[in-house]
Image: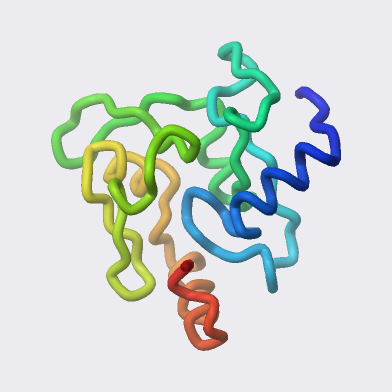
Amino acid sequence: MSSIPSSLRQLVIQRAGNRCEYCGISQVGQVATFHIDHIVPSSAGGATIADNLALACVSCSLRKGARQKIEDPLTGQEASVFHPRQQQWKEHFSWDDVQVVGLTAIGRATVSALDLNRPTMVAIRAEEKLLGRHPPP
């Protein structure tokens, strides 16, 4: 695991608006500190640079792990995991109230692999909605 300088960590947090770049939940109100995720994992040659780092809640970070390719549940075909630096969230996902909807193979595969609509996440988003923190800007 590579060490991430605090200035780079702060850049990633600020750029993400203090939100998980995969599921959209806010770090505000969460007990666990979000991870700085290597989008392309270090084990696959991913560098510790701003363009390869994303803010990820603990659940998304651990579910993603070192995976770069996952199965689209609709087609069964291999798809890439969503890449927050190279792709726009709104092109691959949308909101159905507090549920994340995958719009593309990448979106569907990421929703499935990271289990973005598991009951706990839906409950957190419902609470965030009541607090005015959902949907993300």
Q: Is residue 29 above or below residue 24?
A: below
Q: Is residue 70 left or right of residue 17?
A: left
Residue 88 placement, left or right of 78:
right
Q: Is residue 130 above or below residue 6?
A: below
Tell me: 47 left or right of 20: right
Of the pair 93 and 71, the residue shown nearer to us: 93
Write the residue at 60% across / 12% down.
45
Tell me what residue is drawn at x 61 percent, y 59 percent.
17
Residue 41: give x, y in percent of width and height: 59, 23
Q: Which quadrant would residue 96 be assigned to in this image?
A: bottom left
Observer-nearest residue: 124 or 28?
28
Residue farthest to the top, as pictured? 45
x and y, in percent, of residue 40 in the image = 54, 23
Q: How many marks on residues?
A: 0
For image coordinates 50% across by 67% down, the residue present is: 120
Q: Quadrant of the N terminus?
A: top right
In x, y percent, where is residue 79? Answer: 29, 28
Colour scheme of the rendered structure: rainbow
Q: Residue furthest left?
A: 75
Left or right placement of residue 107 versus residue 133 in this view? left
Q: Which of 53 and 112 is in front in this view?
A: 53
Q: Is residue 93 above or below residue 79?
A: below
Q: Residue at horizontal 22%, vertical 43%?
A: 104
Q: Quarter-wise, where is residue 110 in the image?
A: top left
